[in-house]
Amino acid sequence: MMAEKILMKTPLVEMDGDEMTRVIWQMIKDILILPYVDLKTEYYDLGLEHRNETDDQVTIDSAEATKKYGVAVKCATITPNAARVKEYNLKEMWKSPNGTIRAILDGTVFRTPIIVKGITPYIPTWTKPITIARHAYGDIYKNTEMQVKDGSKCELVCTDKDGNETRSLIHEFKGTDGIIQGLHNKDDSISSFARCCFNFALDTKQDIWFATKDTISKQYDHHFKDIFAEIFEKEYKEKFEDAGIEYFYTLIDDAVARVVRSNGGYIWACKNYDGDVMSDMVATAYGSLAMMTSVLVSPDGIYEYEAAHGTVQRHYYKHLKGEETSTNSVATLFAWTGALRKRGELDGLADLCRFADMLEKATIDTIESGVMTGDLFLLSTLPNKKKVNTEDFLCAVNETLKKLL
C-alpha cells in the first residue's frame, strides 16, 4: 500500500457527464483514484442540464481548456433527440458534445478493445486488438440534405471567390420524388487526420491500414487517398522503415475482408462514417462496447480520453428507483487511467504512470479472477465466474490494486 498520495503538477481537464456513467464517474474517483492520487483537475459539468443552462458554452469552454492543458478525461454524455428535449425541458436540441469537442481540437478518435481471458472474440482469430482510427470531421455528420419532388433538376453549384460558378448535375427526377445530400471535407482536416494516424502508429509501433472507395468516388475518396500518400511519402516513410512498421492502403471492401481474416494487432484508419460503424462492429466482435478504450488525439499532441459507449440510460432508471445495477465501468475507468498516464508522461511523473498501469492491471486481473459485471458474466467462459454489482466490482478492483501497489 502506498504511504502517501502521488502528487500531480498540471491539472487534467475533467468533463463530467450524464446518467449511469455520471454515477460511475464519482465511484471511480472515490474508490480508486482519490485515495491514491492528489488529484488536480479543472472541472466542467457536461451534464445535459448544465449544458442547457449555459447554452452549451460549457462544452466549448471544456474543449478550450483541453487545448490549454493538453490532457482531458470525459464521461459519457447525452446527445439529445426529441424525447430528451421533452424529458429535460431543453431550450433546443443541443449538438453532440463529442462532435463539438472534436471540431475544436481537430482530432482523430482511436478506439481499442481491452482483451481479457475468458472472453473469446466472436472472430476467434482476433488474438490481438484492432484499433479503429476514425476521422472526426465532415462527411454525413456535416451534411446538407433535402427531399425533392418529381420533376426537380438537382445540381452541385460551386461559386469561387471571384463569383464564377461551376455546376455539375446530380440527378433529374422524372416520375418519382427523391432525396439528395451534399457532403464536404477540408484538406487541412484530412491532413491532420493522416498525421494523427501516422504519429499514433509510430507511438504504438503498429502497422496502419487506410481504406476508402476511391474506385467509385474518384474525386472525394480519391482525395483522401492522395493526401495520405503524399504526407506518408514526404514525412513518414523513413520513420516507418526505421520503426519496422508498415502503411497499407486498400479499398474499404477489401479491408473488411482482410480484417475478418486477420489476427489483429494493427490500426485501421477509417473515414468518419466508416469509423462510426466499424468501431461498434469491432467492439461487439471483441465482446463489449464497455471494454473499449477511446482517445481523441489532435495533430499537435492534445489528448482527450473517454469511454466509447453511451450513458447507460436503462441502468440509470433502475438506479433512480433504488434497484441494484451491474454496470460495466471498465471503459470509463480506462479513460481515467489513459489520462493519468498521459499526464504523467507529459509532466515526467513516473509514479503517476506506474499507478495508471497498475490500476489497469488490477482491473483486468479482477475480471480474470472471475469477478465481473453482468454483461461480462454472460460472455465469460471462466469456470468460477461471479456476477457482482456496479460498486462491488470497483471495490474488488481496489482490493486487487492494494496488493499490486
Image (tube, rainbow, N blue to C red):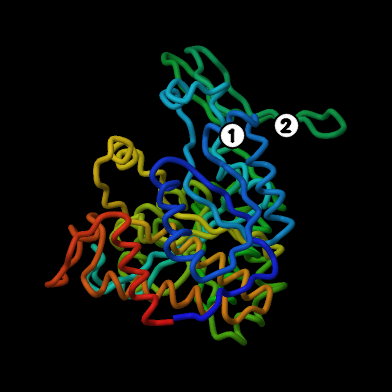
In the depicted structure, whether residue 61 falls above or below residue 124: above
Which amino acid type is marked by label 2? Cys
Q: From mark 2 to mark 1, how far is it between C-alphas?
A: 36 Å
Q: Find numbered disc 1 in the image and state the secondary structure of the residue it sits on.
A: helix
What residue is pinned by disc 2?
158
Determine if residue 390 is in view: yes
Quadrant where the image shows the N terminus:
bottom left
Between marks 2 and 1 in the image, the one whose residue lies nearer the viewer: 1
In the depicted structure, whether residue 18 falls above or below residue 181: below
Which amino acid type is marked by label 1? Arg
Residue at horizontal 30 percent and vertical 54 percent from the top:
390
Relative image position of residue 346 (x, y in whole percent): 67, 73
Determine if residue 226 is in view: no
Relative image position of residue 177 (x, y in whole percent): 44, 16
Q: Nearer the viewer, residue 336 or 127?
A: 336
Marker disc for residue 128: none
Residue 201 located left or right of residue 334: right
- First reached walking from the N terminus: tag 2 or tag 1: 1
Quadrant where the image shows the C terminus:
bottom left
Residue at horizontal 40 percent and vertical 52 percent from the top:
24
Q: Find numbered disc 2 in the image and state the secondary structure of the residue it sits on.
A: strand
Residue 9 located left or right of residue 289: right
Residue at horizontal 54 percent and vertical 52 percent from the top:
74
Marks 1 and 2: in contact by CB < 8 Å?
no
Of all residues, the one furthest to the front in this rendering is: 3
Residue at horizontal 36 percent and vertical 65 percent from the top:
259
Of all residues, the one furthest to the right in this rendering is: 162
Q: Nearer the viewer, residue 343 or 301?
A: 343
Decide: few, some or many residues near mark 2? Use Cα within 10 Å; few <14, some 14-19, many ≥20: few
Residue 204 located left or right of residue 193: left
Marker disc for residue 51: 1
